[in-house]
Amino acid sequence: MEDLDLKRQRIFGRQVKRLREEKGLSQDDIAARCRVTKGSLSVIENGNRNFSFTTLLALAKALEVEPKMLLDIDFELFSE
Amino acid sequence: MEDLDLKRQRIFGRQVKRLREEKGLSQDDIAARCRVTKGSLSVIENGNRNFSFTTLLALAKALEVEPKMLLDIDFELFSE
């Protein structure tokens, strides 16, 4: 796992956690709303999983945001 | 694989293909710019792969677009 990939997974994880907390939702709430388990959500929020496209969509739906909102952050893709 | 997942993978695949062609890039061009092989790109564009988060970022970089642009489409998430 390249460091850059890990860094970007962490950037994404923080975004999910931020949006979740902004909406006053717990990890249990998210797990109850979609097929992402509490354990998986915790690993994703900590940036330790290269999750799939359909998991991203499931998280967006559970958080009630458009999928692109989850990626509306600077991944420093073009500054390497 | 739920039909809805497949449908959304196809929606995403068409978006990638549209952006690639708009920029006048071939599948070979994209494969040369990032670690996604031509074969994988073809499967993704046809909606037949549940690709990973880091693959999404690699595609965005190769297409020279922000990652959220790849998801700037209606996945009909909230109309089920």
Image (cartoon, coloured by chain):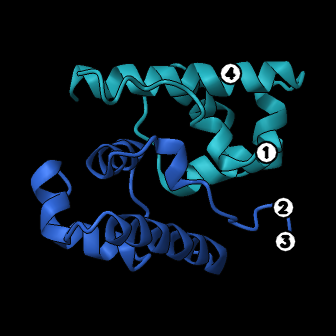
Chain colours: A cyan, B blue
Q: CA distance from mark 4 to mark 2?
A: 21 Å
Q: Secondary structure at mark 1?
A: helix
> Chain letter of disc 4?
A
Determine which of the numbered discs, if any, sits on residue B80 in the image: 3
> Chain letter of disc 2?
B
Q: Is B17 positioned to the left or the right of B28 in the image?
A: right
Give the foreground label among 1 and 2: 2
Q: Residue at x 37, y 42 (%)?
A: B57
- Find out whether the residues at labels 3 and 4 contact each other: C-beta distance under 8 Å: no
Label 4 vs 1, first from the N-terminus: 4
The vertical placement of A52 against B10, above or below, is above
Q: Residues within 10 Å of mark 2 (few under 14, many from 20)?
A: few
Amino acid of disc 1: Ala
Amino acid of disc 2: Phe
Q: Visible in this render: residue A36? A: no
Q: Residues within 10 Å of mark 4 (few under 14, many from 20)?
A: some
